[in-house]
Each structure stands twice: as C-alpha cells, then as structure tokens.
Image: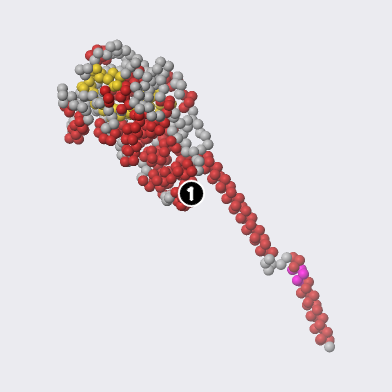
Amino acid sequence: MQSSVFLGKSDKPEALSLKYANRHGLISGATGTGKTVTLQIIAEGLSAAGVPVFVADVKGDLSGLAEPVEIKDFLTERAQKIGLDPYEAKRFPICFWDLFGEQGHPVRATVSEMGPLLLARLLDLNETQEGVLTLAFRLADDEGLLLLDLKDLRALLVDVAERAKELSAEYGHVSRASVGAIQRRLLTLEEQGAEQFFGEPALDLMDFLRTDDEGAGIVNILAADKLMQTPKLYATFLLWLLSELFEELPEIGDPEKPKLVFLFDEAHLLFDEAPKALLEKVEQVVRLIRSKGVGVFFVTQNPLDVPDSVSSQLGNRVQHALRAFTPREQRVIKAAADTFRPNPAFSTLEVITQLGIGEALVSTLEAKGAPGVVQRTLIRPPSSRMGPLSDAERKNVLRYSDMADKYDKEIDRESAYEVLRDRAEKLAEQEAKAREKEEKQKSSGRKTKRRRSNRQTVSEAAFKTAARTLARELVRGVLGSLKRR
C-alpha cells in the first residue's frame, strides 16, 4: 500500500507522507518558478494513492492531468537524476467543474447554505447592512421561506422593506437605505455572472470524495480562469466549500490517508481585506477540519499572504524561488526562511533566491508529526501533460462524465420568490375588493342622501302644486264673498 507521495530528491528522496497530508501545507514561490508543476505532481500522487483531490485551476494548465505527458529528453534526464524509475506517462481520472457552467459541470449552492456572513463578505457590506441581511435570513427561517437563488433573496428584501415598521418592532431597526444598498450590490453581483452559482441542484460535497473503478482518487478541477475576474466570489466559494465539509463530515481523527485534499491556488484572495470575523472562521476551519480527514494546501506567490494564525497550521511546505530586489521582498524572504527547520548544510535565507526552475526547499512532517529539516530538492517531473487540454478534449471528458445527469440541468422549485409573489397577489386582490366595496358603500350613501334632501320627487311636487292651487281658490272664494258684501 502506498504510504507517501514522491516529490523529488535532495541528498535523499523527499516525500509527502499520506498519514500527515491532512496537516495541511503551503506551496509558494515567484511566478515561473514551478509552483504549478509541484501542485500537479502532488495531485497525481494523491490520486494514485486513492485520495480524491479538489484543485482550483487558475491558468487552465491542470486540465492536462487527464492526458499522459509527452516524454521529452529534459524530463527523462530529470527522472534519471532523481532516481525516478520507472518514469511513465499516465493519465488520471478527473472531473471538471465550473461555477459558470461553461468549462465543467455547474457548481451551485443555495443562498441559505451560503448564509449571511459569507454573503455579506461577497457583497462587501458594512456592519449595518450585514445586520439587515442577517435579519432577512432570520425572517425567512421564522416564516418558512426557502432561499434558493438570488431572485428569492431579492423578493425577501422587497418584503423586508415594505414591512420595515412592523419588523423593526420585533427584530430591531430595519433601515430601508440598507435594504436598497444590498439590492444594488446584488445587481452588481448578477452582472458579474454570479447568479448562476446560486440555485439547484446544489452541490453534494460527497461527489468530491469519489474514486474510479480502479481505486484512483478523482481529481476535481474547478475552472477558475474566468472566476478570477471576480476574486471575492472565488474566495467566498472556496471558504464555503471548506465550511460545508467541516459541517458535514464526521470526526475520524488522523487516518492513514486523507479523505480529501484541497489545493487552493491564488490563496491570498481568501484573506485579502477579509474582516476579523471571517479570518477567525478560516482559522477555525483550517485548525479543525484535519480531524475530518481533509487536508488543505494553499498555493501563493508570497508566503506572507497567509496570516500567521493560519500559517502556523501548515505543516508541509514547498518553497520555490523568491526574488529580492526591494527591502520589502528581502523581509518576505527572511520571514519565509524562518518558517523552516534549519539545515546546517546551507543557509536557507541564501538558497531561497538561488533556486532554479523546478527546484524547491521542501520540509514535510515526519514521525509523530514533527517538521523535517528543510532540504534543497529537485522536484520530480509530472506523469501527466504539462499544459491544458484542447476544447475538444475537454468536451470529450465532460461527455462521458457520470455527473452530467445530476448537475447539468437546472431545477427551479417553489421557494421564497413564488411564496412572496403569491402572497403579494392575494394581498393586492384583497385590497382591490376592499376598495370596490368601499366605492359601492360610498355610492350607496350618496343615493340615500339624495332621497332625504330638500329636492322633491315628481309626486311630491304635483301634490304640493295641487295643494297650493286649492288654497288659492279657497282664498279667492272668501275674499270674493267679502267684497260682494
């Protein structure tokens, strides 16, 4: 049984122990120094060991895992130099995912699953606006309203604004201005294409924990080239994945090999401008998720991109070359060197700037989880293609994927939008009936008043005319008789 992932060779073979792969890791280095290949060979080794992998593919190169490498002389020479025998070209089982549903199976989450904290971060809300959003989620829970997609959330916010006075008495102050600000942020989010992420069928995270018929771990590749244009959505999605896994998976302690390993490229986006509450959540998830058998590897250019509270949890480290042209860069290099257990054979501080392409400083956890002495290591060549698949090759992988029937067709069931729309229509109908009844009553009132007014009916006028005529005749008769006398 495979117990480690071969990374390369220093004066001895360097490997990532599967037993400690859930203790997390960091892969860092300047652009063009070989980080992507290191990420690729770790994904290969984990897959070969039967460990499912999730990797964010920022440049598209990692799609090459689906095809065997074209073995060239420089690759063979590296393999011979580090004692990789046999060195074979190999393809790995992969599954493509895409939040926009263009380069992979759609990845969806419901608004309720995302929750107000992460959604507030995604929308870049201030504290007051976040409070209103939290109130809206609470109202949805209390009234049994399903929040599945963004139209549900928009409808709920309209309802909150219309009932602001009523809700303020029960839930606290509801600012109409804050509701308006949230609605504008939602509109911006939709214009960036994020609307496709919210809805159903929602992702079943257990579909990331699959192996193929031969026992190899599926490499789940998230197409992130377009997603990188909306970095907050990218970071929020990754944090949501970690949080959901933390909530759903059972405690298993330290297994012989992980249940799943995440490889997060451009990891700094997870922490940039993150509020304190969110950083605390990231730290908590990273610290505790290892007991669920999940390993997390952050990939970034600058090792200081990862906060100290999180960096202290990263036991396995691969440091590619860094450049030192400015005082700030020199401080970064010194900080990176200080994270390694020193090797008396060389100066870590000096070597970091001297590393060639495909070379790295490697320190992995050894017996009892202790960090190993840092080693200057030649990284092994990959077995899969170094470079992206063609569009035709990607479509072919998707065509035969068993996830297509489950996720490719969107579902739109009754939720908050439909309930609130029906409620509004019924209320409008009731109000229309009430107005109609009121109009009838007013009309009836006017008719009653006309009958009781000084205006005479035809019969009343005729009677009074006849009476006056009779009176005049009587007067004339009396006066006439008087005159005659």
Q: Please give the name of the residue rendered at 21% of the width and 32% of the height, measured from the top-left corner.
A: 335
| The one of 242 and 421 positioned closer to us in this rendering | 242
Instruction: Locate residue 96 relative to residue 370 in the image: left or right.
Output: right
Magenta span main SS: helix
| Quarter in which the N terminus is drawn | top left
Amino acid beneath label 1:
Glu
The magenta region covers 461-465
Q: Please give the name of the residue rendered at 77% of the width and 69% of the height, measured from the top-left corner.
A: 463
Residue 351: where, in percent of width, then height? 18, 25
Q: Is residue 207 visible?
A: yes
| The one of 146 and 1 positioned closer to us in this rendering | 1
> Does residue 1 sit above or below 200 in this rendering?
above
Q: Residues within 10 Å of mark 1 (few under 14, many from 20)?
A: few
The residue to which callout 1 is attached is 162
Q: Please give the name of the residue rendered at 31% of the width and 27% of the height, measured from the top-left corner.
A: 23
Instruction: Locate residue 40 relative to residue 134 in the image: left or right.
Output: left
Is 30 a magenta residue?
no
Instruction: Locate residue 148 relative to residue 447 in the image: left or right.
Output: left
